Every structure is written in C-alpha cells, then in structure tokens.
Image (cartoon, rainbow, N blue to C red):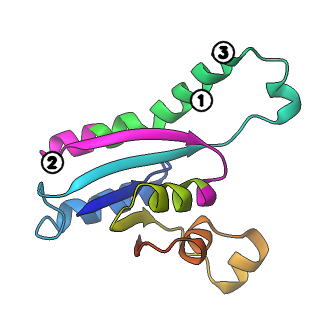
C-alpha cells in the first residue's frame, strides 16, 4: 500500500508517528511510505526581491527542519520512507500530492478543533478530507 504521511513538526505529528509505531501490525515494512511537509510560501512581494537560489534554499531548509526528525523516526522503526517538501498551503499541498501520487492512504495528525473552531480558524484536516479522494486517517 502507498501511504502518504503528512507532517508539520508539531506535537500532533509526534502523536501520529506514535500511532504508527504502536500499530505496526497495520503499518509495517511492507508499505511504501512518503513523508510530505508543506512549507508556507514567502509573500510574493518579498519573493520578488530574493534570488531564486536563495529562496529554494530557504524552502529546503524549512522543510528539512520538519523532515529530519521524521526520517530519524522511520529509521529507528526499521522502515524506509521517501521524504519531500512542497511549497504552499498545507491542505492544498497534501490533497494534490495524494491525488497526483495515487496514494492508497493519507495519514496525518489533527489538532482536534471542534466545529466552531473550524468555522473560525479553518483546518488543514478539514480541507484535506473535503478535497481528497484518497482515504484519510486522522490521529488526534
């Protein structure tokens, strides 16, 4: 099974990784894992005055801050995982990657905001569920 693991480096990502480790009968080495993190885009006016190489390096560094500990987790679990970062709104990035990569499952942590919280603040998890045809496993 192709599994997309969405990570943002928060405590909710740590909980989700803990869930994966605790359920190794479901999430073992037989699966193909890809860990994805979304790096927010630099505002267009600022990006216009920064050379492309510097901007690309900034995005790579920001992505690596999230991906390095997750990569270490997968290695300790004896699992292989590809890692990647993409620039953009996290919900959009995750939903597009799940469709484009033809993943069988998206696994992500969730802050667990209630309905009122989602109305006021919005939610990456809500966006992914609404825009993704791939099944999504939310870990709270």
Residue at which label 1 appears: 59
- The disc at residue 54 is 3
Residue 60 image offset from top left, x and y in percent: 53, 27
Q: Quadrant of residue 41?
A: top right
Q: Tell me where the magenta segment starts and ends, as one range.
A: 72-92
**Residue at mark 3 to residue at mark 2: CA–CA distance:** 34 Å
At 20% from the left and 59% from the top, the residue drawn is: 21
Residue 58 image offset from top left, x and y in percent: 61, 23
Mark nearest the camera among 2 and 1 is 1
At 71% from the left and 70% from the top, the residue drawn is: 122
Residue at which label 2 appears: 77
Most foreground residue, 20 or 85: 85
Image: 83 above or below 102 = above
Q: Quadrant of residue 28?
A: bottom left
Q: Residue furthest right?
A: 45
Q: Residue furthest bottom?
A: 115
């Amino acid at each position: 099974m192709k599994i997309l693991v969405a990570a943002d480096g928060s405590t909710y990502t740590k909980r989700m990784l803990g869930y994966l480790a605790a359920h190794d009968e479901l999430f073992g080495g037989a699966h193909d894992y890809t860990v994805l993190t979304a790096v927010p885009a630099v505002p267009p006016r600022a990006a216009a005055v920064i050379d492309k190489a510097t901007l690309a390096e900034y995005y790579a560094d920001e992505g690596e801050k999230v991906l390095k500990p997750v990569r270490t987790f997968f290695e300790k679990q004896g699992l292989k995982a590809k890692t990647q970062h993409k620039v953009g709104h996290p919900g959009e990035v995750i939903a597009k990657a799940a469709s484009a990569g033809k993943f069988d499952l998206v696994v992500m942590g969730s802050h667990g905001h209630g309905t009122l919280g989602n109305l006021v603040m919005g939610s990456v998890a809500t966006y992914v569920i609404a825009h993704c045809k791939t099944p999504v496993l939310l870990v709270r």
